[in-house]
Image (cartoon, rainbow, N blue to C red):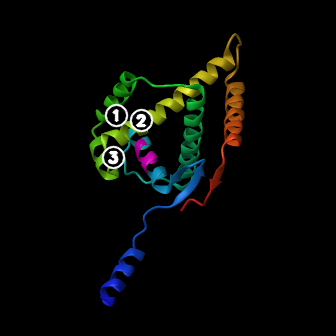
Amino acid sequence: MGAYFGIFIILLSSIVLDSIVAKVGEKSITYSDIIKEGELLNIENGQPFDTPLSPSLKQKIFELILMRHLLQKEAEVQAVTITVKQLDTKVSLYKGNRQMSAFLKRWGLSNINFRALVRTRMLSDKVTEHYIKRLEKGKNISQGSRSTALKEWVEKLKKRQKIVLYPIP
């Protein structure tokens, strides 16, 4: 019995499940979330999904995921929604990509989980679009001013949430 227990401990110690790189409120962002998002971005950009990601790109992807978490909270506050039809259309578009089946299998994403991933991306885009429309209402705003206003808005959103950061492996 003791020998089997020792072997079990050795096997467990050699398995790395994942690393948490941030917590936004009660939600965690993991290293695998960064890799998964990077692979999906590779697909969107016509690259093989398993194209390696540079450390600087991983950092940018992390910042994108962090922003999406903040924007999802903002979508809840503003009651911004995505219709089932909109979601179905976007999911169908993704699933039409020849690499998507391998990507979904690699990550063990069920249809429900993949839909949730796509929904989060869509909500983030929609909340941002609503903010820009409110910002530009009746005004002619330059691209630079819009970019600055968006950065300031994201900083305000960050201040509303408890964010804990950990090193990215």
Span highlighted in magenta in the image: 36-40
- Identify the mark at residue 94; answer none if there is no mark: 1
Q: Residue at x 69, y 35 (%)?
A: 151
Percent x, y of residue 84: 37, 25
Depth check, mark 3 against mark 1: the one in front is 3
Tag 1's secondary structure? helix
The residue shown at (71%, 42%) is: 159
Left or right of 123? Residue 99 is left
Front residue of 80/168: it is 80
> Residue 140 magenta-drawn?
no
| Above or below, 90 relative to 139 | below
- Mark 1 near mark 2, Cβ–Cβ under 8 Å? yes
Please say if 101 is above or below 16: above
**In the rendered structure, which amino acid carries the disc numbered 3?**
Leu
Amino acid type, mark 1: Tyr
Q: CA distance from mark 3 to mark 1?
A: 13 Å
Q: Earlier in the sequence, mark 3 or mark 2?
A: 3
Residue bearing the label numbered 2: 118
Q: Which residue is mark 3?
A: 109
Vertical order, 161 against 55 (above or below): above
The answer to which of 57 and 1 lies nearer the viewer is: 1
